[in-house]
Image (tube, coloured by chain):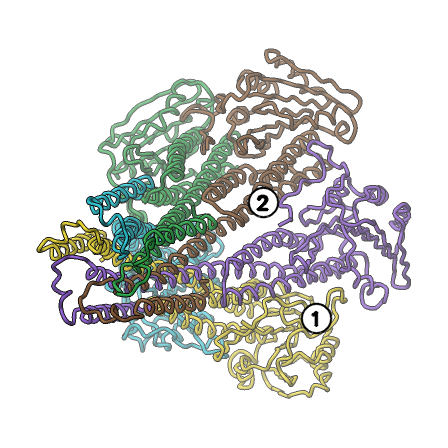
Chain colours: A cyan, B green, C brown, D purple, E yellow
Amino acid sequence: MPRKLVHRPAKKIGAAPGTLVFTGEKKVEKCRIRVIDYNPQQLTESEIPVKDVAQCCPLKDTRSVSWVNVDGLHLIKVIETLGSCYGLHPLVMEDILSTEQRPKVEDYENYLFIVIRMLTFDEERSEIKAEQVSFILGETYVISFQEVEGDVFDGVRERIRNGKGRIRKMGPDYLAYALLDSVVDSYFHILEKIGDQIEQLEEELVTDPTPETLRKIHEFKREMILLRKSIWPLREVLNGLQRDETPLVSEATGIFFRDVYDHTIQVIDTVETFRDIISGQLDLYLSSISNRMNEVMKVLTIIATIFIPLTFVAGIYGMNFEFMPELRWRWGYFAVWGVMLGMGVLMFIFFRKKRWL
Amino acid sequence: MPRKLVHRPAKKIGAAPGTLVFTGEKKVEKCRIRVIDYNPQQLTESEIPVKDVAQCCPLKDTRSVSWVNVDGLHLIKVIETLGSCYGLHPLVMEDILSTEQRPKVEDYENYLFIVIRMLTFDEERSEIKAEQVSFILGETYVISFQEVEGDVFDGVRERIRNGKGRIRKMGPDYLAYALLDSVVDSYFHILEKIGDQIEQLEEELVTDPTPETLRKIHEFKREMILLRKSIWPLREVLNGLQRDETPLVSEATGIFFRDVYDHTIQVIDTVETFRDIISGQLDLYLSSISNRMNEVMKVLTIIATIFIPLTFVAGIYGMNFEFMPELRWRWGYFAVWGVMLGMGVLMFIFFRKKRWL
Amino acid sequence: MPRKLVHRPAKKIGAAPGTLVFTGEKKVEKCRIRVIDYNPQQLTESEIPVKDVAQCCPLKDTRSVSWVNVDGLHLIKVIETLGSCYGLHPLVMEDILSTEQRPKVEDYENYLFIVIRMLTFDEERSEIKAEQVSFILGETYVISFQEVEGDVFDGVRERIRNGKGRIRKMGPDYLAYALLDSVVDSYFHILEKIGDQIEQLEEELVTDPTPETLRKIHEFKREMILLRKSIWPLREVLNGLQRDETPLVSEATGIFFRDVYDHTIQVIDTVETFRDIISGQLDLYLSSISNRMNEVMKVLTIIATIFIPLTFVAGIYGMNFEFMPELRWRWGYFAVWGVMLGMGVLMFIFFRKKRWL
Amino acid sequence: MPRKLVHRPAKKIGAAPGTLVFTGEKKVEKCRIRVIDYNPQQLTESEIPVKDVAQCCPLKDTRSVSWVNVDGLHLIKVIETLGSCYGLHPLVMEDILSTEQRPKVEDYENYLFIVIRMLTFDEERSEIKAEQVSFILGETYVISFQEVEGDVFDGVRERIRNGKGRIRKMGPDYLAYALLDSVVDSYFHILEKIGDQIEQLEEELVTDPTPETLRKIHEFKREMILLRKSIWPLREVLNGLQRDETPLVSEATGIFFRDVYDHTIQVIDTVETFRDIISGQLDLYLSSISNRMNEVMKVLTIIATIFIPLTFVAGIYGMNFEFMPELRWRWGYFAVWGVMLGMGVLMFIFFRKKRWL
Amino acid sequence: MPRKLVHRPAKKIGAAPGTLVFTGEKKVEKCRIRVIDYNPQQLTESEIPVKDVAQCCPLKDTRSVSWVNVDGLHLIKVIETLGSCYGLHPLVMEDILSTEQRPKVEDYENYLFIVIRMLTFDEERSEIKAEQVSFILGETYVISFQEVEGDVFDGVRERIRNGKGRIRKMGPDYLAYALLDSVVDSYFHILEKIGDQIEQLEEELVTDPTPETLRKIHEFKREMILLRKSIWPLREVLNGLQRDETPLVSEATGIFFRDVYDHTIQVIDTVETFRDIISGQLDLYLSSISNRMNEVMKVLTIIATIFIPLTFVAGIYGMNFEFMPELRWRWGYFAVWGVMLGMGVLMFIFFRKKRWL
């Protein structure tokens, strides 16, 4: 369980707010800046070296839609430069860097600041990994910040290049939608994986529950707690975006945001369903433990209840009294056997009646 | 447990929104399009071959009420044609095809898009099956999409043909109501079936609970989780329709929607009641397991507590010491029997006092 | 447990809404119509034969307050006649007949339609019975529909006859209040009965809990679930009536409705308290089962732990080895007794220290 | 457990609303009426004999603040007289007398009617007693009704007499505040007592839990249920008073009501905390029972597992076969002892490994 | 468990509201007053002797931002003097002194009164300590009251002295923000400590759960209850401050308050997550107890079930009947051994089949 439960916010206690410190682990070596600038007619795609990050600044004022994608956050310089030329609030920059933010959307008049959590499933260790993705949605641009370089946005990039579909014709709000949509879509992927595992667990529970099963249930429960924490706030984020509260999101795009919102509700529903199912599995596990204990007890009781009295009878005739008339009887021994068999049969009938056999 | 817990949304990660892919299983071979066009005076009913689906388009502009019913969603062409001539939003078409939508109602100015879940009870495997039913409610038409051809709407069809009652006199909003009402009515059918089974389980619990009973309780619990997920959102859907928020639903029809809303609340109440009852049954099951264990333990304890000391006494006089005065006593053997019977009686009194016998 | 858990709504699947079918059991043989027409000065009371039900119609237009009380719903003709002359909406008539409605109030401009559930306690079978009571509150009339003839409204009838108090001076809204108040008052009667039984159960739990106690707890729990389902929605009903939202309820009467509302809240509070107490009792029961099991185990353990080693010692000297020096010792036998007593005392001290004795 | 769980409302089923019947037990012999009339300059204090209750009536119209305090409610005449001269609504009078009201505030234009519950801790029987206190807050007067004469209001009385502080300078709303504040303050006293007892229980739980402990936990739980029922609704009452919704409460006094409101929230928080702690204690109790059972089982298992096989060995050589070679061996007896000791040591090692010893 | 569960409010029952009594323990000897007065250009820092507290009063009217920090509340005189020259409401002064207030913000037109709880982690006794911190935020000043002198505000003091960053340029609202932010930041520190301990507990649970583990879980649960009580209300406090409802908080500072609000939500989320995890751990503990009991029972059952029948067989041939043919058989003894071994093997197979071995 190597995941940390709490993370301090970006700055040290007492440090001035807006002080830029990257608090995550440095997850990638390289910091990569990719820029796509497009309008319905044309498209420019380029990768900008970290030291020349200021080249992104003029894009702010072009009329075409420009998407600046930053992978890797450990170079504070990059954030600072972008922040100053795009006029970002110091708290926004601080939040981009402190990678344990709760998903949220904040309206800073000229731009929206959106923070969400990207989840990936590490097949090898079969655990979920979370990273923070932040978006700045301005009037003519979208800036996205990722902790590590991923492939989730590749589909969007492809669609922009192809120039097919709606994306080239619409503004940066639609681009932001497309990016958010990719992230939410990827949640379904995770849920599918977890769903498979839960079903496998269900089978294990029915056929052969072991303490290992319990440990797995416990781990799923914990995973659900963390998943929930990542996804629930997204609901409010998308609810905020779908309503036409900001001029940065056009009404036409609002309908699309409503669609992602629906998907998020579906994801949340599924997470809640999983929680219910897992807690049902815990009950089932505990009951099956009780059932087994019961069965063990019955075996013990049947054996003990049959043989303890018989042993007593044998003990009686093992006594060494000088005068024990039965001992001299011709058929004494066989009579005792008869008594014993009789007792055994009675017990058997008793257990049958009790439905223990 | 062949039901899948999660379903991905329609498109692959990164695919453009609005890309039409049918994600359900292909549940029927044929795709069938039936059209009914009526006004108080006359009625035209026809079945349109799939390749001529474009014939439905002119109906949009007639003043009579037209109901286009599509069974089977695997022919994307059909949805596309209808979508383009009725001016449906790409997301609507996508949602019709991705058959794991959450029930919802969406207002697209010219038409309402309603998604609900139809439930059927598979008697054979005694499990609930869900399919998605979507409605487009326009000013003069209703289009309904079903995954498989069912008989739930037959009653409505019959009422239209007869021309009796309110249905022929009222607009497409009333038709939409009638269709929704049929679906909600069918829920009662399901609940009745489940209610019967729960009562049967109750009886089983009282007379003879087995681990099989536990498994059934667990399955019911799970069924309730899934049922709830299907029905709860319907509440909001119908609440949205009953209020006169859209000009597509007249005030007169609003009263009828309020009635379906009431039925839905009743269904939800019943599902919640079932959940409570089932969780009470689980408690009862666990307690009865404990009770039985207790009983088993008592039997064991009574037998062991009576015979272990007696066996000890017998063991004493089975010892081979040369000098054991009791062994030589004339009435030693009978005295021992006396002592043993005395001990037995004392034990019996003790157990009585403890109320174990 | 003869109560059914679910009831289908009035009509068959697909039947036209507004089709009148009585869905309850036919609980009374006779259908009885009683009419009281009064103003502060005078009073007419009459019983109208079922076939002449149309005689009630002219009352609609008199200025005096008229109360039509229908007991027994199996004669659909009666409802139809009243419905048509009082101008009731078809859905209202349908709801009057389908006797498993959720309590609700519906505003149909000219009249209010109120549905509530009347509860009676069947002393003999010690279970709660529910029936549906519906009210139509018009500008000058109240129509009440009951499944069976009961005595709950007798007090109101008496007060009208006496002409004392407020009732004769006020309008039909006050009459409706008086009737609702009688019903809510009768809930207290039920709760008192249940409260007594719960207290009895509490005593049983403390003195001598048996599996029968568990069964009773379970039944109470179930009863509470059903009670809750009947009473909770009443809250909204009365909340709706207390606010001056409809011209049919005068401000002066609104204060009285607020009073019934308060009583309902009190009833709900009590039901919730009962639920909490019952669930506490279940915990107590389970704990006492555990405690007892513990006690049983201790007795077994004490006996076994004392005598098993002693029996072993006796067994040792029951062996038939040719060379066993102890057997020949003069005081061997008594020494063994000494050893055994010593072991017993040590065990006793051990159990004391463990606080098992 | 002598406290009744339910109480019928004031009147019998069917009795006219507003019929005055005192439903509580007659808790005091005497009915005492004390009147204080004050303004910043002067103060009149008097006790009015019950038969002359009408003397209170002129106070209604004086400009000074008058506080009429009635202890004991069994003399309906008193309530009636006050009610008629102060113009109280019949339902108000009925509610004053039916002493199981839920805390509430009702606005009757000319006056506010406030009902709260006063709690006192009966040290002797260590249980909480509740009585109803009602206030009428008019423009120039406060009337308070108590079931029994208590000392909670003595502090307020003293402050009025002293003429120090704010109370003499402010209106009846401030007086009402002062009285409510005394009542809420007294809750802290109760909570402190209960808190002490819960802490004591905590200690008992850790050192030596007995079934008696369980009974206490159960009783606390029940007490909390009843406490909660008394205090929760107070929240709404005070929330209603703190907002300037009625001209009867001045803005300056509103700030003071906000303070009592805060105290109430604090009380509710504490009650909820207690509930959580108690339910945690129940868990702890159950776990410690399980733990002990486990310990008992281990002792039994260790003893049985060691001695049963040894007894078997002894039994073997107690057999009387004619040909048993070991019996003739010179060191047979000692060899058997050796074998037995070896088995014992092995068992000991086994239990050590299992960490049972 | 030395923490008290309830604390009475400041005054005795019946004491006039606004009476100043310090109710906390006297946690520090000295009462220290530190004043910082600054504007963007200059800074005055001074410590004022307790007896000259009135020197703080003129600061109210300067245009520069002044921060008066009072450590130690036992000198009521200090509060009174500050209260009267800054025009504080008596209830505010009372609340500053009664150190068990619920976090809250109150708007008194000229100033805001903010109460929050400062938490510190006592490493030695590994428990959380809470103290109350109150702020008065006026137009040109902030007054802060602490129970003990702490180092949480040192960072803010330093930033003011350095004159770097935003703090010197902005008003007292920003200063209040900076102080609140320090406190909320310190919560993360606490949570981190607790998180570490919970993870340690998790490990203990998996490897070797003991009753001590249970005690720890119970203590954590309790700690969470108290933590929650301290932090939850902060949510509302900061929500109130972030919205521009008061002219005392500028819009620019509102954005910063929104940031602390976000942090608080994050803290609350974490506390809730901890609660869920701890309650999961309790389940896990209980299950592992059950599992172990099961294992113990199995060992007992296996041993008893194997040896009790064998002992019976040995007992049979230990009987002293004169005529027992088997005893004379040449290979009788060995035959018995054979039978016994056979029985043992059968048992072994039986247990294998049951999967107990």
Q: Secondary structure at mark 2?
A: helix
Check the image and name the residue furthest to the front. B330
Image position, residue C297 (x, y; %): 39, 56
Q: Nearer the viewer, residue E304 or B79?
A: E304
Check the image and name the residue furthest to the left. E330
Asked if residue D239 can be seen in this view, the reply is yes
Query: Measuring 73% from the left and 45% from the top, which residue is drawn there?
Result: D25
Q: Secondary structure at mark 1?
A: helix
Q: Mark 1 belongs to which amino acid?
A: Glu
Image position, residue A184 (x, y; %): 35, 55
Q: C179 left or right of D30?
A: left
Q: Is residue A327 above or below residue C147?
A: below
Image position, residue C356 (x, y; %): 44, 62
Q: Which mark is residue C199?
A: 2
Query: Measuring 49% from the left and 72% from the top, which residue is drawn there?
Result: E187
Q: Nearer the viewer, residue B156 or D42?
A: D42
Using the rendered image, report if marks 2 and 1 lie on a common chain. no
Q: B330 left or right of D109?
A: left
Q: CA distance from mark 2 to mark 1?
A: 45 Å
Other residues around mark 1 within 10 Å, as few (<14) / some (14–19) / many (≥20): many
